Image (tube, rainbow, N blue to C red):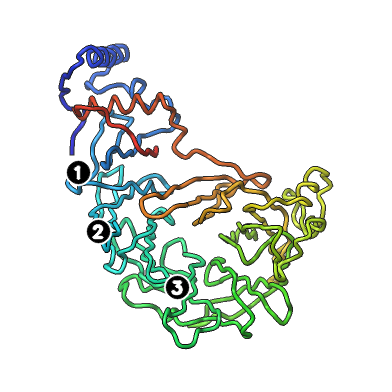
Amino acid sequence: MRGLLHKRTIIIPMLPALVFMLLMTACTDMVGSKDGTLPQACLPLSNIEGCGGAVFTSGGRLYVYDAKNGSVSEIDEVAGAKHFLGLSPDRTAAAYLYSFRSEDAFQTAEKIGIYEMASGRKTELALEGTMDQLMKVYWISDRTIMAISHLNPSADIYQAFDAREGRCLFIRPVGRLYDVSRDGTRIIYYFTQHFAEKLLPPHLRVSGVATGDPGNAAGFDEPVYEVRDGDDRIEQACFAGGDRVLFIEYVSEAAGYKLKEAEIKDDSLAVISEAPFDFPGLDAENIIAMEYFEDRYRLYIISRYTGNRGTDGAGSSDTGSMDAGIGNAGDTGAESGSDGNPARTAERTAMEDGIYLFEFLLRQDESEDMQPVCVNMVLTGLDADAGHDIAMEAAGDRIRVTDITGVGTDVRKEHYIYDGNGFSAILTDGGVSPGDLRELEEYAREVTGSASALKIDAIELY
């Protein structure tokens, strides 16, 4: 690994390099640095407020740039080619894939690397042999990494790690993953054996992983909740704080949906509260993500909407009644219906196809009974034709949304903010301009002594 500001190699043409060196010297003289390092005001990205540095990839190699002292070093140089997975949500560690091999003409990776910027510590996470058709790897919390591999036409296999300690938390075959706890030690999912003679009815499974011994489950993986009728089905589920779970179930007898709250008890789920959950515009069959925030009694759902398709009990697709049951995002949810704004009402009564975010208030007081009220819905602008893995987290009084699309090494991560009124994209890399990128590329070439510019393929700031 290369250290701080190595002795530069003079290359042809000499004039640009000479000008660059003279500029750096002039900056140092102006500030009067006593230790010989370059002042931060003259370093790349120093114009971006709060930027401590960057992790970037160039030609299959991964580098870390420290904007405080000007160092540029390759991360884990001996590991060879790497694929950058991005920074942890708290932006203190970088994750990357390496140790690539071919498996039946499918290119996959055997290891995940974790690099912590503050200490320079590297941690190796070894993927199980069954993860040989790797599709996605991404952060689900500041210290938890999730890897997903194709298993068979009915299920994928999921492996989660404590990225900071290098421990496998669990590895599970999953037919449909509903939610992962923040610490990665529990998941809610549905699974049916691929070659089963008799399919199980729709059900929920909850894994309670004994993380001291990742091979042992804590008695949760068997079905913990099953529907009562063959025509019933479970559409989505999420953790709701403590040992509680929320899930949406279509109940054929009632010809509608119900939102149910259950408590994990021993090896089963005990339903403690339920309420009708049929809202115009909400297509429960096409929910992408669902997250509950206990401190504000709010449930957020991101779902596709196709007005031309019947919703089978999820509410009429007749856009003329779209305003029913929807209140103003700014009120307490005690009253539902139009917010009195003709423009917003017109927007709701003419919903276009796409992906929407719905905000629900589940409780209006400290009562244990749920009284769901839809207080807002907004069109997100997300690509309705793409697959999405979406995570939501509180960011003050707003909701931060992370959206991951694509498969394999072609995975893209985008970030958005929902502020109670609208849904908008945000740039977590600080909006690095083309000029800043070119400056960093030239600076990195000079510092590392590379014979050619390090063309930056992807970058994230910390």
Q: Judging from the image, what secondary structure is the residue with disc 1 in?
A: helix
Which mark, residue 3? none
Which residue has dot 3 on it? 154
Q: Would you say residue 336 is visible in this rendering? A: no
Residue at left offset 30%, top offset 73%: 213
Query: The C terminus is located in which quarter?
Result: top left
Residue at left offset 39%, top offset 26%: 436
Which mark, residue 102? 2
In the drawing, does residue 367 fall left or right of residue 152? right
Q: For the residue carrying disc 3, how many other residues have a C-alpha within 10 Å: few (<14), some (14-19), or many (20+)?
A: some
Which residue has dot 1 on it? 77
Residue 381 position (above or below residue 264): above
Q: What is the quadrant of residue 441 in the picture? A: top left
In the drawing, does residue 344 fall left or right of residue 219? right
Q: Would you say residue 58 is visible in this rendering? A: yes
Q: For the residue carrying disc 1, how many other residues have a C-alpha within 10 Å: few (<14), some (14-19), or many (20+)?
A: some
In the drawing, does residue 326 fall left or right of residue 235? right
Q: Amino acid at mark 3?
A: Ser
Q: State which mark lies toward you, 2 or 1.
A: 2
